[in-house]
């Protein structure tokens, strides 16, 4: 059975209030009752002490004193009884109590000169009473005593009146508490309902929803956490959408990039099998097939390299080599491609500069970046520079190409990203994975890579690779 949270709050609050008021009411009622009876006993004791002090005075008018005291006390609904050492009543108003019965314990106390107060007595008299038994001691001997009796009925009426007003106070307090509890419960439920409605909107794909938050209580903290969660979900959704768009572009690029060499290879093989290619053209055709095959292998390897790097399946084995030798290798391999676009590769590095890196992976890093510079530079220059300090080797690759806007710089490290989406026949970095691989490889070397660029003025890559001390 489903119980609404509002009703759960009301039930819990009401139960706590009722139990609390019930306990407090009972304790207060018991306290007031004891207080009233104690005051009654103290009142009777004070009257008894006054009467005993007057009885000690020698006077032939002693019975008259007792009669006068009895009349005065009767007006306050108090009866006076005196008795001798044997328990025989010597005075009582109208002879109502001819003899009294004291317990053995009470006799012992009065024989020792102690007063016996009883807040409630239900057995010895015709009605429930409060009484005080006070001994009269003469020459250290019990000569009798007196009893002051007050009916409980009047006290009970007063207690009933007090309890009635106490009940009124409890009911009024309970009603006010219920109203406050209802208000607070509705307020909390309303705040929770806002979060619930917002969660429903988020589940339907709306990530622009926000709920009011505060630091007042846990619900406010929950609302703040909810808003933070929605912000992160929105960012994740945007990243997923962006990745999905790049994935679709990637699939389109893959289809195009693979179809072109495969179509070329198929055409050549069909021509050779059907003797459609002259003998003098076959060597050239085989060269074309070999070139397109290498291109296919490069396409596949580039994607596999990225996955291996991401899954930490590539081990880095560092060696120390002259940086100038590495840069000359890059120039030698890419000079032909640079010349195709009327670019010039220039090297500037001191022969004494060393670099500590995995040689093959360092070549891969520099080739990827240099190819990227060649690709976006037309009729310009590409500089390969080297510098060093005590702790690191600095490699700069700068071009005079088309450059990038500042908001494009962070995007170039993303997988499948291409700065120029219009190009579909790029023999280097076909899948948009080149720079993603570069960054991962630099990080595996515990290095850093930074990019600065300006639209129409070129791009500059700065790689910093740490130098490990020989002692370490």
Image (cartoon, rainbow, N blue to C red):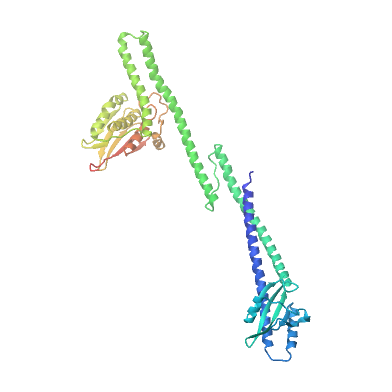
Q: Position of residue 459 (x, y in %)?
A: 34, 34
Query: Residue 403: in sight, yes or no?
Result: no
Residue pictured at 41% horizontal, 37% vertical: 407
Q: In terms of depth relative to the viewer, which is nearer, 297 or 369?
A: 297
Query: Residue 74: in sight, yes or no?
Result: yes
- Quadrant of the rendered image containing residue 64: bottom right
Vertical placement of residue 357 versus 223, above or below: above
Q: Where is residue 131 in the image (x, y as percent from the top left)?
A: 69, 76
**Residue 431 relative to residue 34: left or right:** left
User: Which residue is farthest right?
Assistant: 94
Q: How many marks?
A: 0
- Quadrant of the rendered image containing residue 411: top left
Q: In which quadrant will I find the C terminus?
A: top left
Vertical placement of residue 196 versus 424, above or below: below
Q: Where is residue 360 in the image (x, y as percent from the top left)?
A: 29, 31
User: Which residue is farthest left?
Assistant: 352
Q: Position of residue 385 (x, y in %)?
A: 27, 35
- Quadrant of the rendered image containing residue 320: top left
Vertical placement of residue 415 versus 50, above or below: above
Q: In which quadrant will I find the N terminus?
A: top right
**Residue 99 relative to residue 333: left or right:** right
**Residue 385 relative to residue 23: left or right:** left
């Amino acid at each position: 059975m489903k119980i609404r949270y509002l009703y759960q709050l009301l039930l819990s609050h009401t139960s706590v209030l009722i139990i609390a008021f019930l306990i407090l009411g009972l304790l207060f009622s018991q306290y007031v009752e004891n207080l009233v009876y104690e005051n009654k006993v103290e009142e009777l004791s004070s009257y008894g002490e006054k009467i005993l002090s007057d009885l000690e005075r020698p006077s032939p008018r002693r019975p008259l004193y007792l009669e006068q005291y009895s009349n005065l006390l009767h007006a306050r609904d108090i009866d006076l009884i005196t008795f001798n050492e044997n328990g025989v009543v010597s005075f009582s108003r109208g002879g109502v109590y001819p003899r009294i019965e004291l317990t053995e314990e009470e006799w012992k106390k009065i024989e020792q000169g102690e007063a016996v107060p009883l807040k409630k007595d239900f057995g010895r008299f015709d009605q429930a009473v409060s009484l005080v038994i006070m001994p009269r001691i003469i020459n250290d001997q019990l000569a009798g005593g007196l009893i002051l009796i007050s009916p409980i009925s009047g006290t009970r009426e007063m207690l009933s009146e007090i309890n009635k007003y106490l009940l009124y106070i409890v009911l009024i307090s309970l009603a006010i508490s219920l109203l406050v509890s209802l208000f607070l419960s509705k307020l909390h439920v309303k705040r929770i309902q806002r979060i619930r409605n917002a969660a429903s909107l988020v589940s339907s794909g709306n990530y622009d929803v926000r709920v009011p938050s505060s630091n007042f209580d846990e619900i406010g903290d929950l609302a703040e956490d909810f808003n933070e969660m929605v912000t992160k979900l929105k960012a994740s959704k945007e990243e997923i959408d962006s990745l999905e768009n790049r994935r679709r572009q990637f699939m389109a690029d893959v289809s195009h990039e693979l179809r072109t060499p495969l179509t070329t290879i198929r055409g050549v093989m069909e021509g050779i099998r059907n003797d459609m290619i002259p003998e003098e053209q076959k060597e050239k055709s085989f060269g074309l097939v070999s070139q397109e095959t290498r291109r296919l292998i490069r396409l596949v390897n580039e994607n596999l390299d990225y996955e291996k790097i991401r899954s930490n399946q590539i081990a880095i084995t560092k060696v120390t080599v002259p940086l100038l030798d590495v840069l000359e290798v890059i120039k030698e391999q890419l000079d032909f491609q640079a010349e195709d676009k009327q670019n010039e590769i220039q090297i500037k590095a001191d022969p004494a500069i060393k670099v500590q890196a995995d040689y093959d992976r360092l070549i891969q890093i520099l080739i990827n970046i240099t190819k990227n510079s060649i690709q976006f530079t037309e009729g310009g220059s590409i500089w390969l520079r080297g510098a060093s300090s005590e702790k690191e080797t600095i490699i700069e690759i700068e071009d005079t190409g088309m450059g990038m806007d500042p908001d494009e710089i962070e995007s170039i490290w993303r997988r499948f990203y291409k700065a120029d989406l219009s190009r579909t026949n790029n023999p280097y970095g076909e899948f948009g994975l080149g720079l993603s691989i570069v960054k991962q490889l630099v990080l595996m070397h515990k290095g850093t890579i930074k990019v600065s660029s300006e639209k129409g003025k070129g791009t500059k890559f700065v790689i910093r690779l740490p130098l490990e001390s020989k002692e370490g």
